[in-house]
Image: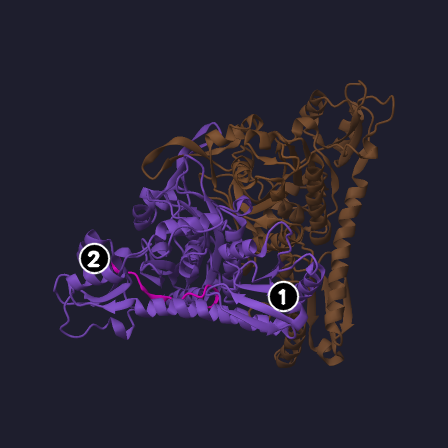
Chain colours: A purple, B brown
C-alpha cells in the first residue's frame, strides 16, 4: 500500500551480509510484513496481511498433518489462575518472571491474579484429567492455535522475539513412556517436514541439554535452523513431559490390569518464529524472497507495451493468466497503467514473488513467455504452449535453488572443536555450529556464553551414535571426562 | 470419552420445553462440547474438540466468503493501551466497565494499564491510518480471528454468554459513506447466508435502535435468530462507523481532488454465540442435533450382528463406509465389540450424528441399508446400489427438515401489538417478537424491560418500507407519535 506507492521508499538500503539486523527490520517493514506495536507496548507487533497469509500457509500444512495423525483442535481459556501455575513447581519457576498478569476485571480488583497464558500445560492437564478415566480414553491429543504472552525484556525483532506471539501448542496423554516418546518424535518429524518441504529450510534435530529443558519436562527435543548470519534459530520444540504434569494435575487412568496410573504426557509447539526463519533465510538485498509453496502470488505477469501494442499484449497476458489460474497457480497480472515495467519489477522483487513473466510484443509474436526467477534473476524464454507445465517446473526449480542454498549454508556451518579457544575462535570467525565434547555441566556452557554469547543449542538424541563421545575424550571447556557432544552456537 | 463410556450418564434428563436452561447446559456437557472454566474463573469455558470442529466449519465457510470479497486476514496485538481506548470517547464509555486490565508484566508494574482487547477498533484504526495515504489505498479490508474479553458479571451460558469468546472482527475503510454502507450490508448478507445455508437457521435483519448501537457507530445492523424458547439471539452485527473512528485516529486519505478527507469505516463480527444458536435451535431431549453441513460425522454406520453373521456384516459395512468416504462423505463405522447397537444408537443421537445406517444380516442378504434420520427418527430401507447419491439425498433432506422447523418457529414467532399491555401479554404468553409502533425514546423500552426483561432487539432498516409506521399511529408504550416499528423480544 502506501510504502510501495511512494516509489522512493521502495528499495532496501541495508545489506544482509554486513548489517543483518537492520536489513531484516527493513525487509519486514518494506515488504509490508509487520509494524511495531504502539507506544507503551514495545515488544508487540502488528502482523500485516502479507505475513499473515504466510502464517496461514504454515497453519494449513501443519494442521493437515496433525489431523491426519489423530490430533483434534480445541480452545482453552486465555487466562490461567495463579494457583494453577503454581501446581507444577518447575513451571512456576520457569515462567513466573515473564508472565503478564490481569489483576482487574471491569472496576473490580480480582481476588486471584490471572496469568495471560505463557503456555497452557497448567490449564490443559486438569481438563484432560476430567476427560480421561480408563486406558480406552488414551491416547488423547488436542491442539490449539492461539497467541501466548511472555514478558521478556529484550529488543523486539519481529517474529523472532516479541512479547506476544502466535503459535500452536499440542498436548497429549499416553499410557506408557514409550508411547509418549513416539508422539514426541512424530511431532518433531512433522516440524522437520514443514521446514524442509514447505519453507525450504533444512534443520538439525536433537535435544536440549538438561538445564535448558522445558520446565518440568523429561526431554525437550528441537529442530534448529542455521541462518545465513551464522546464528541458530530454535525452529520448534517437542517435549516429552514424563509424568510430572500428570502427577501434579491428577491425570490418571485405570489401566487394563485395573491399576490407577499417571499418564505420560507431551507438548509441542511451533510459533511464528518460523516466519522469521523463512524471511531471514531466503531474502536478499532486493527484499523478500519466498519459496513458491507459501508465496501469496507464485507468478506475477508484467506486460510490456507501447500504445500501439497495448491491446495485443494485454490480451495475450490475460490468456496466460487465465490458464495458470485455472490450473490452480496463484498468479497476478499487474496491468496497472500508472507504473512502468521497471517499477513493477522492483516492487514484486521487494515483495518476494518467486517467478516473473515478462510479456511484450516479441513474446506475443513468437508465442512465447519470458520467465525470470526471483532468487537469482535467471531468465529463460519459453513456449506459450504447455505454459502450465512449464510454470510448475519453474516453480519447482526455484524451490530447489532456495533449498540448495540453505543446505549449503548448513553443511558449511557445522564445525568441530576440541578446545575452549577453538570453540571461541571458530564461532567468532565463522558463526555456525561448533560440535565439541562436553562434560554435561552447565558451568562450561556459561563460560562460553559469557565470552561470546554462544550457548549449547542442542545435544544429539540419547540413542544417537554421535552422542557416544570416544573413550577418553575430554570436555573442550573444563577438561573433565566428556559425556556427550554439544552443539554450541549463537542463537536468535 | 469418559462421559460416553460410562453408560449411565448417557441420557439427557432435562426437558428442552420445560427447563430450557438446564437442558442446554446438559446437552453442552454430555455431547462433550464444553466444560466450565476453573475455579476463580467463572464466565470462562473450555471448548472441547467436538464444539471446536463446529467452529472450524463456521470459520471455513465465512473465511472463504470474506476472501472472495476482498478481505485479507491479519493479526493485531491482544492488548490495547488505555490511552488508545480513550481516544474515541464513546468507546471508552461503552467498554470501560467490562475491560480486563493487565497491570503487571513479569515482576514489573506497568506504567500504563493495558486492556485485554474487548474489540479492536482502537488499535486497528491507527495502523490503517499509517497504511492509507491516497484514495488508491482504499478500500482497505482486514479481518482477524481471535478471542476477546468482556468482563460481564452474568451467569455463564456456554457460547451465549462467556467472559472470553472466540469471534472474527472485520475492519474496513472506504472513501465514501455509501461505499461503507455497501460494505456493511455485504457482511450482513454473508452472516445471513451462513445462518441460513450452513446452520439451517433463518434470521431477521434490521438495525439496532440508536441507544443500543455500537459505541461511536453511525448504524449498527444485526441478524436476529429466534430460539425455540421464544428468546432472540443477536446472531452477528455489522457496523457502519461513519467517520468517528477515522477522525479520532487520523485515518485520512488524499482524495482524487487532492483534498485530505477522513475515511468512512466499518466493523463487523460474528462470535461463537452462533454455536450457541446452532445447539439451541435444533437439539432435542435426546441430545445434540446438527445439520449435516457442519456435523463432524455426517453418517454413522452401526453394524448389527450375531457371532455367525459378524464377518459378513462387517465386510459389507466396511464396503459401504469406503464408498461414502471416497465420495467425501464424513462417515464413521462404529465397529466396537464392547457396545451393543442400542447403546451406540443412543450415543450417536446424543452426539448429533445426522444420519445413521443400520446394517444387519437382512440388509446384507437383500443388498440394502436401513437409513435413520436424527431429527425425527424417520426410517427407510434403501438399495445398496447408488448408496452415495442416496446418502446425499438423505443429508439434504435432514437439512431441509431442520430448516423447515426453524422457519416455522420464526414465522409463528412474529406478532403485532399496538398497546403496552398487548406487548407485555404477548411476550409473556408466547415469547417471540412483538412488532409495535414506537416513538423512538429509550424510556419506552426501559418500561417494558423493567416489567418483563424484553427489549427492542431491532428496528427495520431506514430504507425499509416497514419502517414507515402509518400516519397517525401512536407509540404503543407512551402514546406519542410513533416514529418507527420496534421489534420487542427477550434475548440471550
CB under 8 Å between discs 1 and 2 = no
Q: Mark 2 belongs to which subunit?
A: A
* Extreme-left residue of the structure: A479
Which residue is labeled 2 in the image? Answer: A445
| B152 relative to B367 in the view: left or right | left
Give x and y (percent) for residue A399: 48, 68
- Please determine if labels 1 and 2 lie on a single subunit: yes
Q: Which residues are magenta?
A: A197-210
Would residue A457 be seen by someone viewing this image from the given angle? yes
- Is A203 covered by the magenta stretch? yes
Q: CA distance from mark 1 to mark 2?
A: 50 Å
The tag on residue A328 is 1
Q: Pinpoint the chain carrying mark 1.
A: A
Answer with the quarter of the image where residue A408 lies: bottom left
Q: Residues within 10 Å of mark 1 (few under 14, many from 20)?
A: few
Closest to the observer, B296 or A434 = A434
Q: Position of residue A231 (x, y in %)?
A: 32, 58
Position of the C terminus of chain B, as image quadrant, is: top right
Count of numbered badges drawn on the protein = 2
Give SS at disc 2: helix
| Residue B23 locus on image (x, y percent) | 63, 45
Q: Which mark is residue A340?
A: none
Task: Describe residue A85's horizontal placement relative to residue A466 as left or right.
Answer: right
Q: Nearer the viewer, residue B199 or A383?
A: A383
Q: Is residue B208 above or below residue B396?
A: above
Asked whether the viewer can see residue A179, the reply is no
* Helix, strand or loop status at disc 1: loop
In this orientation, which residue lies closer to the viewer: A278 or A264? Answer: A278
Apparent side of residue A173 relative to residue A471 in the rendered image (left or right)? right
Seen as rendered, the residue at the extreme right is: B471
The image quadrant of residue A188 is bottom left
Amino acid at each position: 500500500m502506501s510504502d510501495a506507492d511512494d516509489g522512493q521508499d521502495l528499495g532496501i538500503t541495508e545489506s544482509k551480509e554486513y548489517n543483518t539486523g537492520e536489513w531484516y527490520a527493513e525487509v519486514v517493514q518494506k515488504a509490508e510484513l509487520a509494524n511495531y506495536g504502539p507506544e507503551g507496548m514495545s515488544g508487540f507487533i502488528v502482523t500485516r496481511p502479507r505475513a499473515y497469509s504466510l502464517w496461514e500457509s504454515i497453519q494449513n500444512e501443519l494442521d493437515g498433518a496433525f489431523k491426519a495423525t489423530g490430533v483434534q483442535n480445541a480452545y482453552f481459556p486465555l487466562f490461567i489462575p495463579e494457583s494453577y501455575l503454581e501446581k507444577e513447581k518447575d513451571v512456576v519457576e520457569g515462567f513466573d518472571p515473564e508472565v503478564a498478569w490481569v489483576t482487574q476485571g471491569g472496576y473490580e480488583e480480582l481476588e486471584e491474579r490471572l496469568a495471560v497464558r505463557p503456555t497452557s500445560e497448567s490449564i490443559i492437564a486438569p481438563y484432560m484429567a476430567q476427560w480421561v478415566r480408563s486406558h480406552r480414553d488414551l491416547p488423547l491429543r488436542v491442539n490449539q492455535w492461539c497467541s501466548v504472552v511472555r514478558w521478556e525484556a529484550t529488543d523486539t525483532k519481529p517474529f523472532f522475539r516479541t512479547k506476544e506471539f502466535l503459535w500452536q501448542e499440542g498436548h497429549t496423554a499416553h499410557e506408557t513412556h514409550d508411547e509418549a516418546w513416539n508422539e514426541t518424535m512424530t511431532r518433531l518429524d512433522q516440524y522437520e517436514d514443514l521446514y524442509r518441504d514447505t519453507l525450504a529450510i533444512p534443520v538439525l534435530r536433537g535435544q536440549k541439554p538438561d538445564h535448558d529443558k522445558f520446565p518440568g519436562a523429561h526431554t525437550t527435543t528441537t529442530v534448529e535452523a542455521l541462518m545465513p548470519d551464522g546464528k541458530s534459530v530454535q525452529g520448534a520444540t517437542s517435549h516429552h513431559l514424563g509424568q510430572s504434569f500428570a502427577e501434579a494435575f491428577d491425570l490418571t487412568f485405570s489401566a487394563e490390569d485395573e491399576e490407577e496410573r499417571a499418564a505420560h504426557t507431551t507438548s509441542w509447539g511451533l510459533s511464528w518464529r518460523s516466519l522469521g526463519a523463512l524471511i531471514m533465510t531466503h531474502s536478499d538485498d532486493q527484499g523478500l524472497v519466498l519459496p513458491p509453496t507459501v508465496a501469496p502470488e507464485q507468478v506475477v505477469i508484467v506486460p510490456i507495451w507501447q500504445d500501439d501494442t497495448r491491446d495485443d499484449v494485454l490480451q495475450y497476458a490475460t490468456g496466460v493468466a487465465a490458464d495458470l489460474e485455472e490450473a490452480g497457480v496463484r498468479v497476478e497480472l499487474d496491468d496497472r497503467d500508472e507504473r512502468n515495467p521497471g517499477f513493477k519489477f522492483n516492487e514484486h522483487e521487494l515483495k518476494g514473488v518467486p517467478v516473473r513473466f515478462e510479456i511484450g510484443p516479441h513474446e506475443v509474436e513468437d508465442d512465447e513467455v519470458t520467465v525470470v526467477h526471483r532468487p537469482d534473476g535467471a531468465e529463460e524464454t519459453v513456449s506459450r504452449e504447455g505454459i502450465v507445465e512449464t510454470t510448475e517446473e519453474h516453480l519447482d526449480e526455484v524451490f530447489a535453488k532456495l533449498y540448495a542454498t540453505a543446505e549449503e549454508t548448513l553443511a558449511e556451518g557445522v564445525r568441530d572443536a576440541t578446545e575452549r579457544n577453538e570453540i571461541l575462535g571458530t564461532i567468532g570467525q565463522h558463526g555456525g555450529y561448533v560440535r565439541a565434547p562436553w562434560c554435561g555441566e552447565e558451568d562450561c556452557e556459561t563460560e562460553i556464553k559469557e565470552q561470546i554469547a554462544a550457548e549449547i543449542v542442542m545435544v544429539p538424541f540419547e540413542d544417537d551414535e554421535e552422542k557416544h563421545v570416544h573413550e577418553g575424550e575430554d570436555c573442550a571447556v573444563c577438561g573433565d571426562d566428556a559425556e556427550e557432544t554439544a552443539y554450541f552456537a549463537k542463537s536468535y
